[in-house]
Amino acid sequence: MARTKDFDEAEVLNKAVCLFWHKGYNGTSMQELVDHLGISRSSLYDTYADKHTLYIKALEFYQNTSGARIFEIVNNNLPAREKIKKLLEFVSAELLNDDQHKGCFMVNAEVEVAPHDTEVRDIVCRNEIQLEEAFYAVIDQGQKNGEIPNNQDARALTRFIINTVKGIRVSAKSSVDNAFFGDIIRITLSVLD
């Protein structure tokens, strides 16, 4: 008979995200995971088998939760340009509100682990595609309904904005100046004029 979990898996994954995000994959030990997650070592191994599997689950959990917030913005009834602004503000606000200046969990995974781990690289790539498609849908619709001029290719504009998002995510590790990110957002939006 299979044992039932005696913990809330979403809560454990959220805690795992926080720890991996703060210390990195390589900087996090199994003992720190046991201590931080508040579950027994046997429960940790029974559920996730090893640190790598837990890291993969944590990345997927992060992708799903942040992706849900992005799609909430994409699917609202705001004009296209305002949606793009809200998406950029969401990305920067999430990072600026972090007192530890950890940067973006997904970008950290891309830099630290993805070059040596195809499973992590696949998750990072899926996340980038998901983000690109969200921005593309808004820009494409904005061009079709005349809110955004169509003098630029929608896919090229999207890729420019995605590159800007990555820059924001990296810059948030060292800058906490709202005006800095406000300037980036303002200039980025100007390419949609």
Image (cartoon, helix red, strand yellow):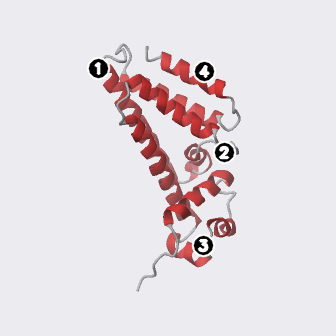
Give x and y (percent) for residue 117: 54, 54
Quadrant in which the C terminus appears: top left
Image position of 66 with respect to 86: above or below: below
Say which residue label 3 marks: 39
Image position of 9 with respect to 146: above or below: below
Q: Give the amino acid at mark 2.
A: Lys
Would you identify the image quadrant in which residue 51 lies?
bottom right
Q: Going 31% across and 16% down the picture, which residue do you hit? A: 146
The answer to the question of whether label 1 and label 4 lie on touching residues, with beta carbons closer than 8 A, is no
Q: Give the amino acid at mark 1.
A: Asn
Q: Residues within 10 Å of mark 3 (few under 14, many from 20)?
A: some
For the residues marked 4 and 2, what is the alpha-carbon distance in whole angstroms?
A: 21 Å
Would you identify the image quadrant in which residue 177 lies?
top right
For the residues marked 2 and 1, what is the alpha-carbon distance in whole angstroms?
A: 39 Å
Pointer 1 or 3: first along the chain: 3
Pointer 2 or 3: first along the chain: 3
Q: Nearer the viewer, residue 13 or 47?
A: 13
Disc 2 versus disc 3: nearer the observer: 3
The answer to the question of whether label 2 and label 1 lie on touching residues, with beta carbons closer than 8 A, is no
For the residues marked 1 and 3, what is the alpha-carbon distance in whole angstroms?
A: 52 Å
Give x and y (percent) for residue 61: 48, 55
Residue 183's disc number: 4
Q: Give the amino acid at mark 4.
A: Asp
The answer to the question of whether label 4 and label 3 lie on touching residues, with beta carbons closer than 8 A, is no
Q: Residues within 10 Å of mark 1 (few under 14, many from 20)?
A: few
Say which residue label 1 marks: 145
Image position of 130 with respect to 113: above or below: above
Would you identify the image quadrant in which residue 175 lies?
top right
Give x and y (percent) for residue 165: 53, 32
Q: Residues within 10 Å of mark 4 (few under 14, many from 20)?
A: few
Pointer 1 or 4: first along the chain: 1
Say which residue label 2 marks: 102
